[in-house]
Image (tube, helix red, strand yellow):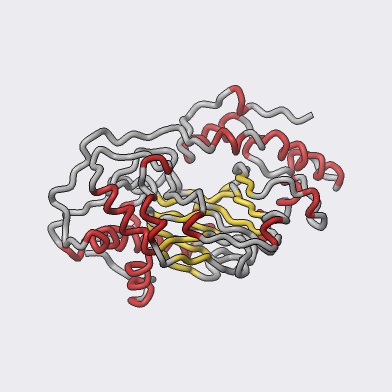
Amino acid sequence: MVEYKFLTPEQREHFLEHGWLLVPGSIPKEHVDQWMKDVWTRLGYNPTDPSTWTEETIWMPRHRDMLTKEFSPDAYKAMCELVGGEDRLDRVRNAYSGDQFIVNLGTEYWKDHDIDPRTMPAWHIDGDWYRHFLDSGEGALVVIQVYTDILPRGGGTYICEDGLEGICKFLYEHPEGSGNKPETGMYDHIKKCAAFKQFTAKAGDTILMHAHLPHCTGKNHLRKLRVIANPHVTLKEPLNLNRANPEDYSLCEQVILRALHKPSLPEYHATTARERYYPRNYVAKFSRVQGELERMVHAAEAAGKSRDEVDSVYLKGEEAIKVHNVRNGLGGEVQASQRITVA
């Protein structure tokens, strides 16, 4: 039986109905401030001059991290109860929260233009590191950690609440598994959906989304800095959609059963191997490390500090990078490209 000591009945029902949950004020301000203090240095942009903002959306690499259980205790409690208990979590993969920020700066064009969310080109479910099945546990929850206030029209993530059912149906009908790219046909139904929402939030909030809730990057019409991080919750084993005791179903499992209008799925079985991959987006993120480190080191030296005071895993030696790699599913070895030298 799943125990609920943190989530209220109202919160549980909201997650079941909408596929997401807001945990307000769940990241202590000191953590937000600590990791945000050098974001403009890392970006290499002038915070007061938008003409220097040459990219609309930036996926940044991770320099530092902390156990999510310590970094955001209330969000962690919610995560555990949504997946059915702490004992179901993978204690290594995605157990840490880090500063792999996703920055949305908008563009001049979007300041006075709008877009119908049904026509947005990048609807997706997360997970570029595994083959997707209906019961996949590799990314049981998508986490949005909020580092800046997100105002209406300020670049918050768009979700398609009534699109979750279509994702579940697609994966149910494809027990051989699927990639998560648009060409699979997984998102074709979104053009007929109606329940779209763009998140707003306060710095320090956490939003927890079901893995099968389709979402996409919202347009930042305000051109105000929007910073989030997007870790995930990984389980030790796949979801169980055929439990003997209905009270043992997690809320994540119940969402799927509701979407398919079934009390259980004894007939569902993955028919091909559960594969994990090297994350597609890591190469792009890592390509930014050299430039970010150089700017971080030079800023520290300009402030009269030594480079040893720069907080980055890439300056802490190969053992630290090995640990970082294991936590992020990159293997336990240090690749030649990960040996960074800052002049």
Most foreground residue, 17 or 325:
17
- Residue lying furthest top: 336
Whole-percent x and y of residue 153? 61, 66
User: Is residue 42 among what the camera can see?
Assistant: no
Most foreground residue, 10 or 86:
10
Most foreground residue, 200 or 23:
200
Whole-percent x and y of residue 184? 37, 41
The residue sitting at 64% across, 33% down in the picture is 287
Q: Is residue 150 above or below residue 306?
A: below
The residue sitting at 70% across, 61% down in the picture is 111
Whole-percent x and y of residue 13? 33, 73
| Number of marks present in the image shown | 0
User: Is residue 3 among what the camera can see?
Assistant: yes
Which of the 4 quarters of the picture holds residue 269?
A: top left
Q: Quadrant of the C terminus?
A: top right
- Asked if residue 9 lies left or right of residue 270, the reply is right
Q: Quadrant of the N terminus?
A: bottom left
The residue sitting at 30% across, 63% down in the picture is 251
The residue sitting at 66% across, 41% down in the picture is 312
- Asked if residue 179 lies left or right of residue 324, the reply is left
Whole-percent x and y of residue 203? 61, 66
Q: Is residue 38 above or below residue 78?
A: above
Which of the 4 quarters of the picture holds residue 236?
A: top left
